[in-house]
Amino acid sequence: MMTTQIETLSKRPTHTAYIVKAKDGTDKSDWIKVGAAWEHSDQAGMNLSLTILGQNVSVIIRRNKSK
């Protein structure tokens, strides 16, 4: 498995991750914070740090390259 270290632009998150849950009996939804994201310095992706069901999960997202 190949790993690559990608530098982020900031030590502070650039984005916040939420799950959106519909409220019963209303048109409104609850936005529940589940993590944060940092944009890569090359602006082609980001690192996500999520807390899901009590577990910390790291996700790296990269822009698709054209074939």
Image: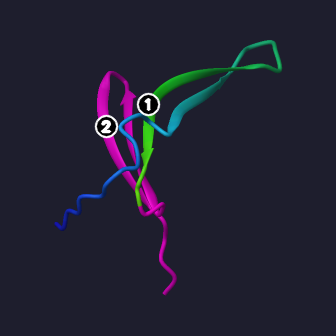
Q: Answer yes or no: do the residues labelled 1 and 2 have beta carbons within 8 Å?
A: yes
Disc 2 marks which amino acid? Val
Disc 1 marks which amino acid? Gly
State the residue lying farthest toward the front: 10
Q: How many marks?
A: 2
Q: Residue at x 55, y 30 (%)?
A: 18
Q: Residue at x 31, y 42 (%)?
A: 58
Q: Which residue is mark 1?
A: 35
User: What number is the disc on residue 48?
Assistant: none
Label 1, label 2: how many angstroms apart (C-alpha)?
A: 9 Å
Q: Is residue 62 above or below residue 11?
A: below
Label 2: how many residues lie within 10 Å, few (<14), some (14-19) or many (20+)?
Answer: few
Is residue 46 one of those drawn in magenta? yes
Is residue 48 one of those drawn in magenta? yes
Q: Which residue is mark 2?
A: 57
State the residue lying farthest toward the bottom: 67
Q: Dividing the picture into quarters, in which one does residue 10 lie? A: top left
* Placement of the N terminus among the 4 image quadrants: bottom left
Q: Position of residue 50 (x, y in %)?
A: 39, 33
Task: Determine whether, in the image, residue 37 is placed left or right of residue 2.
Answer: right
Q: Is residue 52 above or below residue 61?
A: above
| Magenta range | 42-67
